[in-house]
Image (tube, rainbow, N blue to C red):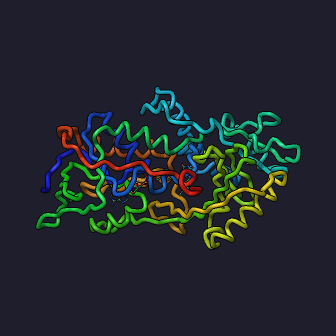
Amino acid sequence: MSSTLTTDIAIIGGGIAGLWLNARLRQQGFNTLLVEQHQLGGGQSVCSQGIIHGGTKYALHGALTGSSEAIADMPERWRKALSGEGELDLRGVRLLSDAHYLWSPGSIASNMTSFLASKAMRGRVDAVKGEQLPPALQDKGFKGRVYRLAELVFDVPSLVKRLTELAGNSLLHSPKLSPLFDAQQQLIGLQAGEVRIQAQRYILCAGEGTQDLLNQLHIDKPQQQVRPLHMVLVKGAALKPIYAHCLGAGSKPRITITTHSAPDGDWVWYLGGNLAEADGVARDEAAQINAAQRELRELMPWLEQTGLEWRCARINRAEPAQNNLVRPDTAFLAERGQVLVTWPTKLALAPDLADKVISSLTQQGIQPTAQPVSLALPQPSIALAPWEHLFN
Ligand code: FAD
């Protein structure tokens, strides 16, 4: 039998954007319902590398850009949340590293070195040596330079788990979701399986699923772009932790490595950066693993690769459409009547996205009015990250 649930805000999609926003809105007194069709975090979020960028990656061509400035506050906001003093209480979430590193395999071109030492970058980067180097680079064969960035790396599955706790009874698992319109084609609710949802505002936080929802809602703009990645995972007892971008010739890191634990306790390196971009996307799995092995042989000739296990994962980044498939600079929000369309564009920017939504709701005069949902609803489970299931 179908039941109708009335709530203040319906959020569609339980990745980092939807979960963070849900927790913030609940804290502000709104009653919310978050609908997830598969598993929480199971889109891009648990596949992300968990780096809370402060923008340095976007300054690799030697200048600060719109995005490096917009994202600069994020590490501090996440750090405060982790200590229980921020906008959300993220105490208990696992921090994998309290710094991310920038590593040059040779000597960094002199304009880059002076840029990293410049006033604009003060407080964001420090050169490190010897025992301060990431363990994986502490080898006498290592000849490059390393800078410590004031950025964090989170264990995203534990972050999703904490945000799920903060969601209380606001979650609903529904594999099917469709909009309901009246005779004048005005949106009057959502049908989520057996449940009919009525809300003051409907917020799309559905990652790659957003375009399909926009089509169903007859919203032409914004449009979505997807930028694919072909990530590589390598596991083995020989690996030591490292969280770093390796500088290449271009403005993007040649390779970005984060370190996670496999269920059997071995370290897993999760390899992204340029390796996973266009040329990597064009390679099949065997060729992509070969390319990763070649890169690591060049960059870390001391690493014994015998006995390492290799896997690949293809994941799309979903974002608002831009000219030439470039990366948008900040979290994105568009208001379309009762519908708000969002893409955070980076996990790190989830707090920025929530700010934008809250300020839009305030401007539109949306106030909490609904009663909390008291029904026992089907609950979504939490997704496993690639390093948690690909080596089984
Ligand atoms: P998603 O995590 O994709 O969540 C969308 C959710 O909506 C999913 O759970 C999906 O099942 C659900 N959904 C879809 N359609 C429907 C529907 N019709 N009904 C109900 N639910 C629906 N960013 C960083 O800041 N740092 C990083 O280190 C980083 N690394 C990355 C590495 C990779 C490989 C990738 C792909 C991205 C990375 N990003 C990183 C970007 C970051 O992961 C994303 O910007 C962010 O996770 C997007 O979150 P989201 O909640 O918008 O989307």
Residue at 19% in and 39% down: 374
Residue 217 visible here: yes
Residue at 24% across / 54% down in the picture? 338
Q: Position of residue 312 (x, y in %)?
A: 61, 63
- Position of the N terminus, as image quadrant, is bottom left
Residue 120 placement (x, y as % from top left): 67, 40
Q: Nearer the viewer, residue 281 or 390?
A: 390
Residue at the limit of the structure toward the right, as seen here: 140
Which quadrant holds the C terminus?
bottom right
Identify the residue at image location x=72%, y=67%: 290
> In this image, 29 relative to 51: left or right?
left
Q: Position of residue 114 (x, y in %)?
A: 78, 44
Relative to 280, is 107 on the left or the right?
right
Where is 300 relative to 165, above or below?
below
Left or right: 212 with respect to 322? left
- Quarter of the image for residue 98 reads top right
Total numbered labels:
0
Q: Is residue 334 visible?
A: no
- The answer to whether residue 9 is left or right of residue 256 is left
Give the x, y percent position of residue 29.
27, 34
Which quarter of the picture shows residue 61? bottom right
Which residue is more in the foreground, 243 or 321? 243
In the image, what residue occupies the spot 81% across and 59% down? 298
